[in-house]
Amino acid sequence: MYKDETPPTETTVVVVAPSNLHEGYTFDVTHNGRTFSVTVPEGGVVAGQTFNAIVPPPEPSAPPLNGEDAYIPAEITPVIAEAIAIPADDGGVPVSTTTKTVVNNPDGSQSIIEETVYHDGRVTKSSTTRPASLVASTLTASTSNTIDHHQQQQQQQRVFADVPTGKWRHGFWGWCCMCCSPMFWMSLCCTYITLGQLLQRLKLSLFAGKSKFYKDTCSFWVILLCMLLFFTILMASTTLSTTPKFPFYIVVLLLTVLSTASLTRARYDFRQRYQIPARCCSNDSCFSDCCLVYWCMPCTIVQMLRHTHDGKKYRYKCCSQTGLGEEAPEIEGLV
């Protein structure tokens, strides 16, 4: 006998649309052993979209739930209708409708219920259970595939600069004809800063090698330049004229060796990447690159900066860490 309480008239389940369905489309789902029809809400749904469906109340003659006199509503359980297949004959009349419903159980397993309704009214049902371990492995693989696909899409969306191959875009001594360009004066007066801009643009480290910290390369060279200026001012001070100059010479020597070695390596890898022949000696040797870097480092830096991007489209920016604006496409890197 029921207690004097009014049982709830509505219980809601969450349904995942198996495909693109138009407004008013009806299909069957199974929840807690009961099979009932749900209707696609206004506006329709797309595959994978969730919507709430109302579970119709039990028939008046149904026995009390859970062995209690009072009506106790069941928990809301997500119901996923994974697939609906509607074969048709030659006249386009549906022959059968198959609904596959997946119920996520509290223990992590899944109950898969398939129900096929034929045009003559016959109904067939089958039920299987997937263990929790298999469900977990499937979800892990699905998540991994989604991440990989997202990374591939990001890679495809990246736009790279069109860098010429086979020969230099501009000659080595073209630097001398740029006296009105900010790139000319930056390379002449702040050589180490333009070197840092070049290495960072090529996605190289302080020593022109592969590194995941290449975005800090220009900052490192700016710090080195500040150190050089500090020692220069210190040595030029008249009040410290008696200060030993040996530390200053050591700093200058180390910076000269470091900058020459880094730019030589970067220029050699640059030529190999874009198949540019050496000016002298063998293409497999960096001797030609070392000579050009040693005798005119600003010329070498400017030639490489002008080769990666067309200066008419992408103007040089002194305060940028790559010498380019944000609108300029990146290059794929030397390594």
Image (cartoon, helix red, strand yellow):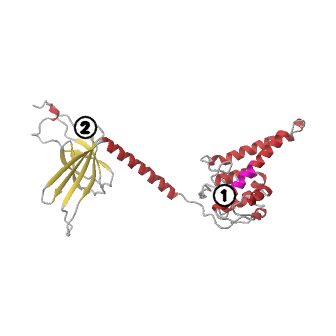
Locate residue 264 relative to residue 163 in the image: left or right.
Answer: right
CA gap between label 1 and label 2 equals: 65 Å
Q: Which residue is mark 2?
A: 75
* Label 1 environment density (alpha carbons within 10 Å; few <14, some 14–19, many ≥20): some
Image quarter of residue 288 = bottom right
Q: Position of residue 196 (x, y in %)?
A: 69, 50
Residue 159: in sight, yes or no?
yes
Q: Quadrant of the C terminus?
A: bottom right
| Mark count | 2
Identified by mark 1, the residue type is Asp
Q: Position of residue 89 (x, y in %)?
A: 20, 67
Question: Is 262 contained in the magenta span?
Answer: yes
Principal secondary structure, stretch drawn in magenta? helix
Q: Which residue is mark 1?
A: 269
* Label 2 environment density (alpha carbons within 10 Å; few <14, some 14–19, many ≥20): few
Identified by mark 2, the residue type is Glu
Mark 1 residue element = helix
Q: Is residue 133 above or below residue 278?
A: above
